[in-house]
Image (tube, rainbow, N blue to C red):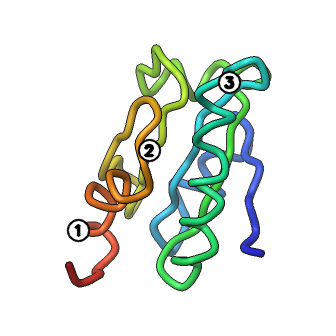
Amino acid sequence: MADMLEVTDSTFESDVLQADEPTLVDFWAAWCGPCKMVAPVVEEIAEEFEDHLRVAKMDVDKNGQTPANYGIQGIPTLILFKDGEEAARIVGFRPKAGMMEQLRPHLGLDG
């Protein structure tokens, strides 16, 4: 199983913005039904594409500053960061194919 990195407001810059590889951050909360639906899809992506990206999770109830900085108003929100910048944003539940359609161009993957 691919490592799912837990990031916090205090580790976000070093773990995500300064990361050498693209990092997909899943902004979620324990009480969020759609977050529970998207979690297994995110885990699949982490496993399948572990050579192309890192996947991190941030609990928005425990970390308010980073979600506020990125204007996150609804969860789940997934943001792909590449070279310290936001490269793609997915809001709400999407099937894996829909997520990969948005992520693929930023990961150097064909098709």
Residue in view at x 32 percent, y 52 percent: 98
Inspect the image, locate mark 3, and give the three-letter code of the amino acid beneath it: Val
Seen at 52% across and 77% down, the residue is 49
The part of the image, by quadrant, that contains residue 26 is top right
Q: Position of residue 71 (x, y in %)?
A: 41, 20
Q: Earlier in the sequence, mark 1 or mark 2?
A: 2
Q: Residue at x 41, y 41 (%)?
A: 94
Lateral position of residue 86 relative to residue 25, left or right: left
- Residue placed under numbered mark 1 in the picture: 105
Q: How many marks?
A: 3
Residue indicated by mark 3: 60
Q: Are the two marked residues, 3 and 1, in contact with CB atoms closer than 8 angstroms?
A: no
Tell me which label, 2 or 3, sits earlier in the chain.
3
Circle 1 crowding by C-alpha within 10 Å: few under 14, some 14–19, many from 20 = few
> Do callouts 1 and 2 mark residues in contact (Cβ within 8 Å)?
no
Res. 79 mark: 2
**In what element is the residue under mark 2?**
strand
Q: Secondary structure at mark 3?
A: loop
Please state which amino acid type lies under the numbered disc 1: Pro
